Structure formats: structure tokens, C-alpha cells
Image: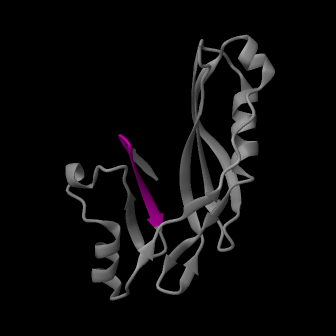
Amino acid sequence: MRYLGSAIVTLSLLGLIFQLSGCANHLGAAAPQSAIAEKTGTGPYTLPKPVYQVPPVYPPTAFYDSVQGKVLVCFTVRKDGSVADAHIVRTSFYPKKDLKALGTAALDAIRQWKFLPERINSHVFGTPHTCQVITFGIRP
């Protein structure tokens, strides 16, 4: 798994598939559906989509200390749409603190999410190396 700005390159069962946040044209990459259809001769392809998202609980200690930041969590989406193997890849907090409570809250939330799994035609696949950024912020 490699990170290219806001793009996440994911290794999938059918090869490299770019999960891009509107950056396909900037990287010169083809859209995932057309690239897969050309290589495999198969039709409609869908990436995993969240259908049930549990928001993270802001830990009181972080809230009272005004700690804000982001947690990058990577996980596997199983064939049934559940989340497995969730782990923290990177965190960034301000003010700089070693605060595991925000990471734990992000993991607890992600583990409860449900997805429509990766699909090619009528075939359903599990998707490793799916990533999500969880943001903790205090609004004035």
C-alpha cells in the first residue's frame, strides 16, 4: 500500500486498483472500472462503500485538553461487509500529545462499520488495505 497525496493505491485480487479522491487525471491513471473491464473482460466493478458508519466517541480527556487531530485506520472489508484487522497507520494531533484514547476511539468506531463489499459483476470479494481517516475536532 502506498500513499500518493490524497490517492490510495490498493492491491486487490485483480491487480492494482486506484482508489482516488478525484485525482485520476492528475496521476494519468485510468478509471478503475474501465481498467478492470479491459484486463478481465468483465463488467461492472464497485469498490467497497460504507452503508453503516458509527461516529467515534470523543474521549473526555482529549476533549478537556482540546486535543484535535486525525487518525488513519486501515482494515479489511470482508465478503459479508464487516470490518476485520483494523489497525492504526498514522496519527496527527494538536497539541502534540501521546494520546492513545483517540486512536482507540477511532478503532472502536471503524470496527462497527458495515460496507457493501467489492463486487465484479455478481462476484463478491473481500478487500484488504482499505483505509479511512477519522477526524477529531472541537467546534467553537
User: In this orientation, which residue lies closer to the viewer: 63 or 128?
Assistant: 63
Instruction: Tell whether 86 sits left or right of 96.
Output: right
43 falls in the magenta region: no
User: Where is residue 46 drawn, in percent x and y?
Assistant: 46, 71
User: In this orientation, which residue lies closer to the viewer: 86 or 140?
Assistant: 140
The residue positioned 21% from the left and 54% from the top of the image is 25
User: Where is residue 52 drawn, in percent x and y?
Assistant: 67, 57
Residue 85 falls in image quadrant: bottom right
Magenta residue span: 4-11
Query: Main structural element of the magenta stretch: helix, strand or loop?
Result: strand
The residue positioned 54% from the left and 56% from the top of the image is 130
Q: Is residue 108 above or below residue 13?
A: above
Instruction: Tell whether 128 sits left or right of 64.
Output: left
Q: Is residue 6 above or below residue 52?
A: above
The residue positioned 69% from the left and 73% from the top of the image is 80
The residue positioned 34% from the left and 68% from the top of the image is 32
Q: Is residue 91 above or below residue 22?
A: above
